Image (cartoon, rainbow, N blue to C red):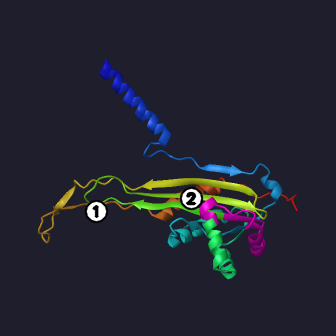
Amino acid sequence: MARHRLVKELAAAALACLALTGAKPKEKVADLVYTHPDFARFGVRDIAMLPVVSFDRNQQAQLTVERFWGQMFGKNGYRWVSATFSRERLRAAGDSVQKAYEDQVRRNARVDSTFAPALARTLRARGVLTVRVDSYEKVEIEPTQSGRASTTIWLKAALVDSTGTLLWSISGNERLEGQQYDPSTVMGINPADPSNRPITGAAVAAPSYEEVLTKLLGRWATLFPPVPRDSTSG
């Protein structure tokens, strides 16, 4: 009886641990979305997308996210100022301004009232959008391993108006897996290999970053507020 009770207690503790850590390996994490209750009142129709920022300064990741954001959000009725144009303006302002901007986005995923007014004036937009890449990684499967390769992207985005008021924000992730791979499928022996190691089927590659971004940002585009019909703010 004592042993049975101990097993039950350990099982309960394990379940509690899973609950605390969010712990299901393939559990889908819901997007966290905030929309200002008076969004339409701000009359934002022009949005400047600022350069994407990542913690590890992965330039390829930043540029890819910018490109796919433009593709997914470019037809939602807003007038968008491209991240490329915004980057040029930030560079023209000097290294110290660009560094201060990147530090602020890495810290808060948005710009505040110290940055927003000048950015909005310079870029001629009533809204300023920032995107931060929190994770951008692939997990590949080695030829001697079994399992599924995967690609995961975590992003956080925020839209503020020209005063720095938060109008919309979203954070979430997308994870795609490749096909199941089993190295036990032996295709023969490599005669050039002195160790006579078996040749196995090629491990299935992880999905591309583009596939993951298409799914993630395609979903986010449907969660973006519609263009306000009229503006009542000055």
Q: Which is nearer the eye, 168 or 67?
A: 168
Q: Which amino acid, by three-letter code, is at mark 1?
A: Ala
Quadrant of image for the C terminus: bottom right
Q: Where is residue 229 in the image (x, y as percent from the top left)?
A: 82, 57
Position of 36 compared to 230: left or right? left
Q: Is residue 82 above or below residue 145?
A: below
Q: Which is nearer the eye, 75 or 97?
A: 97
Label placed on residue 202: 1
The residues tagged by marks 2 and 1 sit, at their Cα atoms, a distance apart of 31 Å
Q: Where is residue 216 in the image (x, y as percent from the top left)?
A: 55, 57
Position of 133 compared to 114: left or right? left
Q: Residue sitting at 33 percent across and 58 percent down?
A: 141
Q: Position of residue 97 (x, y in %)?
A: 67, 75
Q: Is residue 6 above or below residue 174?
A: above
Q: Is residue 33 above or below residue 201?
A: above
Label placed on residue 155: 2
Q: Give the range drawn in magenta.
A: 104-129
Q: Nearer the observer, disc 2 or disc 1?
A: 2
Q: Which amino acid, by three-letter code, is at mark 2?
A: Leu
Magenta stretch encompasses residue 61: no
